[in-house]
Image (tube, helix red, strand yellow):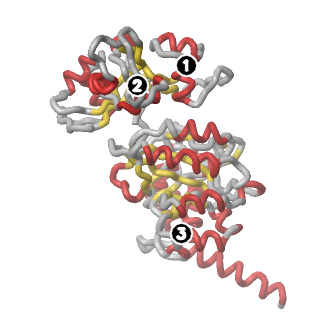
Amino acid sequence: MRKTYFILPIVLICLINLFTINSYGQTVEQLRSEMVNKYRNQIPQEWSENATGVKNRIATNEKIIALTFDACGQGGFSDGYDKKLIDFLIRENIPATLFISGNWIDKNPTIFQELSKNSLFEIENHGTLHKPLSVNGKSAYGIKGTTNVTEVVNEILLNERKIQNVIGKKPKYFRSGTTFYDEVAVKIANDLGYEIINYNVLGDAGATFNKQQIINSAMNSTPGSIILYHMNRPESDIADGLIEVLPRLRNLGYRFVKLEEYHNQLAPRTILPSNYIYYNVVSGDSLWEISNKFGTTVQDVQKFNNLKTNSLYVNQLLILPITDPDRLTPPIEVSHSVVRGDSLWSISNRYKSSLSSIYRRNNLNEKSILQIGQRIIVPVEITHTVVSGDTLWHIGLRYGVSLQEIYDRNNLSQSSMIVVGQRIVIPSIKMHY
């Protein structure tokens, strides 16, 4: 009798999962059957974080960032809860999207209940068993993925039921364990009512970044960035890094949003040029004038900014590809993508920028090691030679920078006197924000 009483609840749970009705009026079993019949003969051609159909940014020029946090629950450190991080978000009223796995829910049921009741947080689906999403058993980072269509459906829907039973509604976004997919699995998720959400800023590299790396990564955000962090690794530097960098981003004019607020603007990866700047449109600008000034083409400006017409508006932020650094008119900042053979010295030489300004702008030093694909912000500065009648106010007005920026860049103050022939460094305009 004891065995019977022990087994019965498990059987009931399995039956509930099997026959629970979803928002389309279908059970899990019916959906499994439907997806197997539709996709059983489709052979995937892709296996990556950016498979066709994956969304990883918000298509906007607004200075917004979507902070997303994964809770994995694979055992060991992965089962934890970063209370310091979450308490900081709550204290600072910073909204975020939380991708929660079924494993993590099982190990942290009380915490999950609390998080689900906080309106700052949007709860989304991180998979039942935190597996890569594959229809043929591909692996990523040593973790074996789902092996067939049935397992893909289970990985999505069984965790959906766990979440829905607590929050009272179906999640709308899915992120797999490891963020890897094939394109067939993505289509299955879409058919089940999900958008696949990854990222365009790797916030903590699987909770391996140190505090400074976390800060540097976040500072590479651009309008519409989706950043991936982890909320299940309290032993990491994630909380300390975000406590320092998120206020910085707010001071630069960024606002933090939940994904659901920009549902209709979620978009796949845009392949950016190797080197580019962000340019703020001013009154009277046209695409032809801007492209001519910076040595690019109207077609490329439209391509990299998803522009359907030639219309512009004041303060619109544009990505401008840079092919010839000599065409740049300083002061300005360039976002440079590190390639094989690059060094900080060669980058400074290419853009005629000082090493010290590159160190300072990117929180680097002479011992820093560059990685291929790393973004380096290069301040392209000029110096102004003081002539008779100049004042710091007139110099700032001429170059479009504030007095305080000139003070800070040249170690001056309100009481400083300037003399004819003195060189004043004009701080670069931070156009990439």
Question: Left or right: 396 with respect to 373?
Answer: left
What residue lies at 58% left-to-right and 66% top-to-bottom? 158
Q: Quadrant of the N terminus?
A: bottom right
- Whichever of labels 2 and 3 marks the residue nearer the N terminus, that label is 3
First-in-chain label (1 vs 3): 3
Mark 2 residue element: loop
Q: What type is the residue that disc 3 sits on?
A: Val
Coordinates of residue 66 in the picture (x, y in percent): 46, 51
Reading the image, the residue beneath label 1 is: 339
The dot on residue 428 is: 2
Left or right of 281, for residue 278: right
Residue depicted at 49% across the width and 65% down the height:
31
Q: How far from the left and from the top, in percent, is residue 420? A: 35, 10
Q: Amino acid at mark 1?
A: Val
Q: Which amino acid lies under the numbered mark 2 shown in the image of this protein?
A: Ser
Q: Is residue 37 visible?
A: no
The image quarter containing residue 225 is top left
Q: Which residue is disc 3 drawn over?
A: 28
Q: Is residue 142 above or below residue 37?
A: above
